[in-house]
Image (spheres, rainbow, N blue to C red):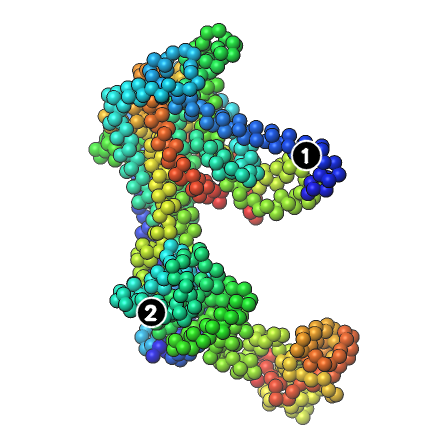
Amino acid sequence: MTDAALADVPRPVSEVTSAGKVLYWAGIVLLCAWVLVPIYFLLSNALSSPAEVTSFPKHWVPSFDMGSLQFFLSFGGVLKALMNSVIVAVLTMILSIGFGAPAGYALSRFDFWGKDAFRLLVLMTRAFPLPLLALPIAVMFIRVGLDDTQLGLALVHTTLAIPFAVLITFSIFAGVPVELEEAAWTLGCNRWQAFRKVVLPLVLPGITASAIFAFTISWNEVFAAAVLTVQNRTLTAFLLQSLNVSPLHLRFAGGAALVIPALVFIFAVRKYMFAMWGIANR
Amino acid sequence: MNTRALPYLLLLPATLFLLVFFVYPFVQVAVQAFVGPAGFTTDNVQTMVKNFRFWPSVRNTVLLAAIVVPLQLVMALVMASIVANLKSARNTILYIFTIPLGLSDLAAGIIWLAIFEQSGFLNSMLVSLGVVDKPILFLSYQNSWVIFVAVLLAELWRATAIVMVILVAGMGLIPKEYYEAAEVFGAGPWKRFLKVTLPMLKPSLQTALILRTIAAFEVFSVVQALGGTTLPVLVGQTYDWQFNQQQTGVAAAMALVILAISIACTVFFLRVLRTPKGATL
Amino acid sequence: MAEIQIKGIAKSFGAFKALHSIDLTIADQEFMVLLGASGCGKTTLLRIIAGLETPTQGEVWIGGRRVDRLPPRERGIAMVFQNYAVFPHLTVLENIAFGLRMKKLPQPEIDRRVTRTAELMHIEQLLARYSGQLSGGQRQRVAVARALAMEPDVILMDEPLSNLDALLRLEMRAELKGVLAGSKTTTIYVTHDQVEAMSLADRISVMNAGRIVQAASPVEIYRNPAARFVGSFIGNPPMNFLPATRTPDGRWSVAGITLGGPAAASGKLEFAIRPEDLTVAAGGFDAVARVVEPLGAHTLVTTEIDGALFRAVLDSDVRINPGDRLSLVPKPDRIRWFDPETSLAA
């Protein structure tokens, strides 16, 4: 469209476009820096010795001293908190996929009475500040003996993760044509066999992604973890409760311990980012 | 084949789960707030309101949401437009933009602590640039507005990504032909953005605003990491009542306040950004 | 022996009646085509026979066995889907062997059948590929091979050629006809393409609005449509219709000429003639040419008779220009009559 203009008055037009281009890419670089530089600061602090963390002024390149991280890992309760975080996140992952995936499958394959009501229930969970549920649930758990347990916290985290699990698995199952399943039925499969031999291999990457997402939700959650655990604190609960009493280098090393796995997780599921949010538009 | 029962069977676990862990607790939270040992009581509400930190926490939370959410919306629109127009390196840049989405809000708080603490990177930069000659204690009760700004920046940094992802997904649903048609009729890039992108993005904007506003009222860990209790916010107070004061009734009353504000905002956005039937894609 | 009997099959989706009490018998080894416009219920009927849809009423019998309550795998059928449904996570070989492995056939037998059907469909060299590496036509071949390998009593095909381009469709059509004739299975084939139906079928069931209007051989369907719908649906261009009134002497007056016809009870009938069964000669319908389309072998002339459109396919030697008046004479033995009340042949 600018070709004709380019031929007539080549210089001004090309100058405008290249100036615009430079501005555009400068904006992109700025925005990327805005996201990445703060993370760099945290990691830089975590890779400095405790003395360097509190010294002034700061070095812009870390000394790659493992002192802070060693101190963090040997600090009382940290390893247990890490373990608890992993256990709760794995339980959350299993529970939310175990409950969510069948629902996602049902929504993708069947038309039935009450479908809209269920969808509404799932979408409604998004319109509420879910972590606050930890308050009444804490009372409920004391009654049934689930207070301060990994399973108890995992159940609350599952409430956070299940709407995502349902919506992501729904879009993943909807991506497998019904005809493939029907073809399997005509070729001698019953419903379960067709699911296992045809649908499952096709959805496995997507299901894995939603499982990782559920893991990340639990791994990152702070409020419910802090309210529901005392002896069995997760890493987030541990860090939150020691914010005021722990030295800076412990906080930065802890922050890095939270951030690094999360970075790996979201890199692993980046392809599915839109499956879970795109759906919210419908 | 028992096809009629199957969908219900598949939905049963998730439904039961949500009833027990979502619907029931919401009823319980009201019960906890308003039922004392002697039946109905407003004691919890009175204790909550009388606390000297209650109104500041309401003010801080609402102010924070009112500033953060619009800023995020503008920033996310810019980021989403950039991503939508990218040809090369789109996936890499999109991944970088979405990184904060996968991080814990506590981690975000600690990240910005690394910048704002007394021996942190902001002071290092100011001193090396000669703006100040010795590091400033930013995050103290004398400078509570700096804590507010730090929380604001951390929230902006952390949660803009989610708005952007929703908007990018929404922009992907707008057929290219509309832009081409607008271009044929003489609309420039800015006009196209105003007259095509924005109106067509309304459902996505609605979703993003609802999700973000509710999350903004839940701000907690970032504040704890940056200011401790110096800057009272609603969820922070709730946590304090529950955990430190061991007054679960008052904590429940606080939760109800947050809930009420959240629902009011949801209803507001549902009404204001309603798309007429048949005007959708 | 796999005769298929469909007895009083009806299907409703909520308030919408997709099928109204269908009765149809398909003989062993017969090639039956279900032909109709989209939404006429032909695919629904096929899916009911396959067991992918449950009928609201009625029975399906295959080879003397009532199957309408059985799942698809127990019906002795194989099916070819419109978009092929070749499993993307399996190779061509694994696709063809899929059903045989489900049947737990011995490995040598599986190998034998895979080799045989792959050769039959000319896809031996593709056996190691995945469906993503195949063209549409090749996927189609895999889908057919997979169905044939089952050596089923009945093969069901749901518009199998509709996603192929025109040339490929022609080629596959001829090939399918040969392969299926050799396989000695009973075939039910759904299509909306009448040429496909004509070329493949032993018998065609023309469907309209959830009913079978006529089930007969292709030539019978073409020459002797049982209802006005069949005449207007089959043939390109379709049949011409003109109103007829009885003259006092028991003959029929059609657009100014008088013809011999059936002794109908009512005084009104509808005269019908195929466009190719008209010749230009004296004493015929007084027609004005409106559009003249030379098609090579023939010339299609769209004319107007008494304000109604009337098409004639004439020899391309005949020179006609728009606006010309011509006299069109129908071949007497090709004239058909319909009752305007019932729309059925009179």
Task: Classify C296 as above or below C165.
Answer: below
Q: Residue furthest top?
A: B133
| Disc 2 target residue | C113
Judging by the rendered image, the residue that carries numbered circle 1 is A14
Quarter containing the N terminus of chain C:
bottom left
- Please tell me which residue lies in front, A138 or A196: A196
Tag 2 subunit: C
- The span from disc 2 to disc 1 (Cα, nearest Å) is 66 Å
Residue B202 vs residue A17: left or right? left
x then y, percent, for residue A141: 25, 33
Residues tagged by mark 2 and mark 1 found on one chain of the structure: no
The relative height of residue C61 versus residue C253 in the rendered view (above or below) is: above
Does B17 appear above or below B124? below
Q: Residue B93: percent from the left, percent from the top?
A: 49, 34
> In the current view of this chain or complex, which residue is farthest to the left?
A145
Q: Residues within 10 Å of mark 2 (few under 14, many from 20)?
A: many
Q: Residue furthest front?
A: C125
The residue located at (27%, 23%) in the rendering is: A73
Which residue is more in the foreground, B29 or A237? A237
Residue found farthest to the bottom? C249
Answer left or right for C16 relative to C306: left
Q: Closest to the observer: C8 or A91?
A: A91
Q: Position of residue A206 (x, y in %)?
A: 38, 45
Residue positioned 72% across, 84% down in the render: C280
Label 1 Cα neighbours within 10 Å, binned few <14 / some 14-19 / many ≥20 = some
Disc 1 secondary structure class: helix
Chain of the residue where label 1 is placed in the rendered structure: A
Q: Is residue C220 above or below residue B275?
A: below
